[in-house]
Image (tube, rainbow, N blue to C red):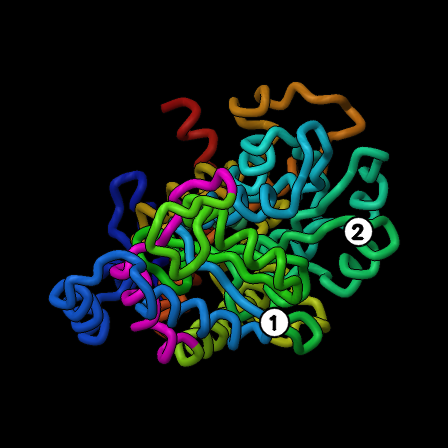
Amino acid sequence: MRSTAGQRLAIDGGPRTRSIPFPAWPRVTERGRRALIDVLESGHWWQSGGGRAEALEEWLAAYHSTIGAVAVTNGTHALEVSLKALGIAPNSEVLVPALTFISTATAVTAIGAVPVPVDIDRDTLCIDQKDLKRKITQRSVAVVPVHLAGLPSDMSAIYELSRLESLLVIEDCAQAIGAEWKGRRVGSWGDVATISFQAAKLIAAGEGGAIIVRSDAELLERIRLLANCGRARGSKGYDHQLVGSNYRMTEFQAALILSQVDDFDDLCEVRAGAARALAQELLDRHLGIPTAVADQVTRMVWYMFVIRMTPSMLTRMTNVELAAALTAEGVPANPIYPPFYATGAYGGGQIEHSLRCPQAESAARELIWLHHSLLLDGERGVSDVVSALDKIDRQSTSWKLERRSG
Ligand SMILES: Cc1ncc(COP(=O)(O)O)c(C=O)c1O
């Protein structure tokens, strides 16, 4: 950690802790460039049989040990198509963790069903098993566990509960490709699972998504039809067997994604090493509380590094202020999501008391998160994050008062 003793905070006009940017994300690699040019020059820009999107689907199915996968336009559509293919009926209830990117909930709304917010576990930030059981009603038909920030949900418990309560399981793996619960990859537990390849994700193509199907061949075929205007794979004519839409991934997206799979595990290792070191530093220096990683998590992929503010820091600033102060110091940070029901899209928090999720609400006030690209800078990156947090912690004793009077 570098000494910043006596320095003013960068947000108040002092010097920045870090003046160089963190590693850029998404990465531009020679392999990616070549992959895109190959598609450009081949003239096969869309899925016309035997191309990159099909190769990606094969890779995804093999990687997750499932029967198949379908490459689609983005993670939001992946959720919508999955829910449609599973036959979720209008007005039925789908259990969704309150703390997630809005698409997990809007996908449910988009198909006419009702997203029911389930609270998160305070330590792991994933769906809370007790609240999940409490929120099940006669109308519940499915649950969408989200592996938030790369942290796997308790998939063994969810799997058992789904059998007991006849719930379908759609795993939202947008933030967690490659993570494992009890030695088994997330994305291989649910009836289906969805992935996002949006620009910030661990494998990025600007936009892009995929649906993974565990074992049901008919379901896989229905998803293929829905994503391809109702046509079967390889059908060149106008044989539309059902009303679908065009959710096809382009060959450019698929090529760019495939260009990243060989490096993926190595980058995960780098992130994991930095995350371990950062977690230890934060604990040792009382600068924040890193997320707990359960013993059953055999692989964590660190899409985001989440920090819970200490009670002392919370008396001096909000998580919005801390994120702004860190960003000014050269360490980009953001407050975590609001519970989805607190957004304008879902009535701005006007929900029945019994549906509220207190842990998700306190997470929205107390947590910040750092993007995984910060973990790709190894020891230097960790040291800069710790220095910036330490500086803010020490200099902010009277900060709130100053800012209020200013
Ligand atoms: C948990 C979660 N679900 C769904 C999505 C939606 O994915 P996309 O942005 O590819 O539509 C995201 C993307 O940020 C996400 O983080």
User: Disc 2 to disc 1, how far (Cα)?
Assistant: 20 Å
Relative to 180, is 390 above or below?
above
2 or 1: mark nearer the eye: 1
Mark 1 is surrounded, within 10 Å at the Cα level, by few (under 14), some (14 to 19) or many (20 or more) other residues, namely: many
Q: Which mark is residue 129?
A: 2
> Which residue, as the protein is rendered here, is positioned at the far right?
164
In reply to whether residue 243 is colored magenta, the answer given is yes
Mark 2 is surrounded, within 10 Å at the Cα level, by few (under 14), some (14 to 19) or many (20 or more) other residues, namely: some
* Residues drawn in magenta: 242-264
Q: Is residue 213 visible?
A: yes
Left or right: 352 in relation to 297: right
* Relative depth, front residue between 124 and 255: 255
Location of residue 139 in the rendering, given as x and y in whole percent from the top left corner: 80, 33
Identify residue type, mark 2: Gln
Q: Which mark is residue 185?
A: 1
Relative to 403, is 94 above or below?
below
Residue at point 51%, 36% (across, down): 318
Quadrant of image for the C terminus: top left
> Which residue, as the protein is rendered here, is positioned at the far left?
41
Disc with the residue nearer the chain's start (2 vs 1): 2
Residue at point 52%, 75% (across, down): 63
